[in-house]
Amino acid sequence: MKQDNINRRDFLKKTGTAALAVGGLGTIISGCTSDGGQKESSASSGMSDEGEMTYRTNKGNGDKVSILGYGCMRWPMIKDENGRDIIDQAAVDRLIDYAIEHGVNYFDTAPVYLQGQSESATGISLKRYPRESYFIATKLSNFSNSSKENSIEMYRSSLKNLQTEYIDYYLLHSLSDGNAFDMRFGSTGIMDFLAEERKAGRIRNLGFSFHGTTEGFDELMALHEKYHWDFVQIQLNYVDWTHASGRNADAKYLQEELDKRGIQSVIMEPLLGGRLSKVPQHIAYRLKERNPQGSVASWAFRFAGTHPGVLCVLSGMTYMEHLQDNVGTYSPLKPLSEDELAFLEETAELIQKYPTVPCNDCKYCMPCPYGIDIPAILLHYNKCVNEGEIAKSTQDENYRKARRAYLVSYDRAVPKLRQAERCIGCNQCMSHCPQHINIPRELQRIDRYINNLKKDTL
C-alpha cells in the first residue's frame, strides 16, 4: 500500500474502533486473537484442528476468512404492533453470538435485503464485538437509481447503517454483463469514487456479484485489468457446476476463469435457495446412506468449500439448527474426494429429472403490486415435486392422495388473497429475478394446475 494510504491497523487506531469491547463479550473471539488475526494452526492451507472452523487466506491482503460466511438476507422476522414484518433483533443477536463464538467472521448483507432492514439489524448486532474481529460485506444495490449522487448516498448510508468506518468487502450488486456494468457503474463516474475509497482504505476489497451467461462473465473479466477485482461472488453448487439452468453460466466455467486470473470467489446459493437440502426422498436416502453422520445439506457445503479458489461460502441461516449444522460441516472442512465428487455429479443428474422452478427465495421479486406471495407459491410447488405430491393425471395410482395433499397444503402455505390466480402478467417482477425466471408464466402454469386439480380435469 502506498505511503499516503491508511492501512487497516492504522485506520482502526485512527477511528478508535480497535479497542471496542461491549457487554462483557470480551476481546478474544473463538478462533481469533485479540488483534484480529486468526490462530495460525494450519489456516494458511485452509485446514484446521478438529472442532475448529476452517479459514482461507485472502491472497491480496492476508485476511483469514472463515470458510462459512453468514448471509444476512434471511434474518428471522416477527410482526410489530402494527402487524408489519420486522427483523427479530433478539434472534439475530443470538445467531450472531453463536456464529462468532464458533469462528464465523464474514457477514454479507445489502441495502435491499429484507426491505432495507438487514444492514441496520446486522450492524446493531455486530457493533457489540471488536470491529477488527469480523469482516463486513455489503453491496451497491443501485438498481432503481444508478446516478453517481444516489450511489454515493447509498454507500454512505451502508456505512451509517452498519455502524462502521470502513467496509471489508464491497460488491457491485448483481451484474450480468458489460452493458449492465456500464449503465449502472461505468458511465456514471461512480467507479472513480469507489477506486478512491479503496485507495483510502474505506473499501478494503472491491468486487461484484454475478448472475448471467458465460459471454457476460467474459465481458466483466475483461475489465479486471482496469478495475482490479479483488474478489467475485458467484453462484456455485453441485448442480450448477455443470447443469446451470436458464441464463446462468455453469459454475465450473466461472470458477476456472477466476482461477486463471488469481481472483478468489465468494460463493452464494450453495444450496440453490434451500433446494439441495430438500431433495426428493430417494435422493436424500442416497446421500444419507453414503454418509450417515452428515446432513443432506452438508454434501452441498463440502462441495462448495472443496475448491481451493473459494475464499468463503455464504449461507442464509434463519434458524439455529441450520447454523449449528453448517458450523459442524466446516469445523473443520473435510474436502470431498474424487470419488465423492463423482457421486455428487451422479446425484446432480438425478435431481435434474425433477421439474422444479429455479427459485432461490431471494425475494428480489417482492413486493408484488397485486399482493401475490411469489416465493411462497414457487417454493410450495417445488416442495410438492420433491415429495412426490404432484399428480400428472387422474389415472395416476396416487392421484387422490396427491390432489388433496397439494390443495390443502397450498391453502396453508399461501393465504387466499396472495395466491397465483391474482397474477395479471404485468411482468414487473421479471427484471428483478437473478435466476431469470419467467415468473408470470410459472405462476399461471401453477394456477392452471390447481384449477385442473379442483375440477378433476388433469
Image (cartoon, rainbow, N blue to C red):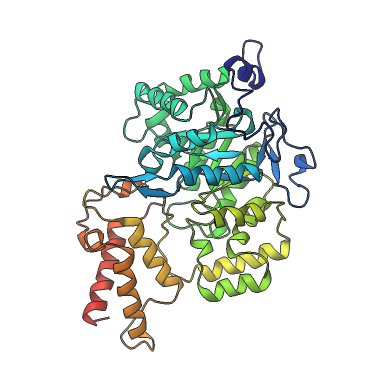
Residue at 24% over, 82% down:
456
Label tally = 0
Residue 106 lies, in percent from the top left, at 59, 39
Residue at 28% over, 60% down:
441
The front one of 30 and 430 is 30
Q: In the figure, is residue 48 to the left or right of 136?
A: right
Q: In the figure, is residue 458 to the left or right of 346?
A: left
Residue at the outermost top position = 4
Q: For the C terminus, give its image quadrant.
A: bottom left
The front one of 177 and 5 is 5
Q: Quarter of the image holding residue 424?
A: bottom left
| Residue 188 appears in the picture as rendered | no
Q: Quarter of the image holding residue 81?
A: top left
Q: Is residue 374 depicted above or below 261 in this figure? A: below
Residue 218 lies, in percent from the top left, at 52, 40
Residue at the outermost front position = 24
Q: In the figure, is residue 373 to the left or right of 108?
A: left
Q: Is residue 278 depicted above or below 200 in this figure? A: below
The front one of 89 and 388 is 89
Residue 380 lies, in percent from the top left, at 37, 65
Residue at 46% over, 58% down:
245
Residue 35 lies, in percent from the top left, at 70, 27
| Residue 42 appears in the picture as rendered | yes
Q: For the N terminus, give its image quadrant.
A: top right
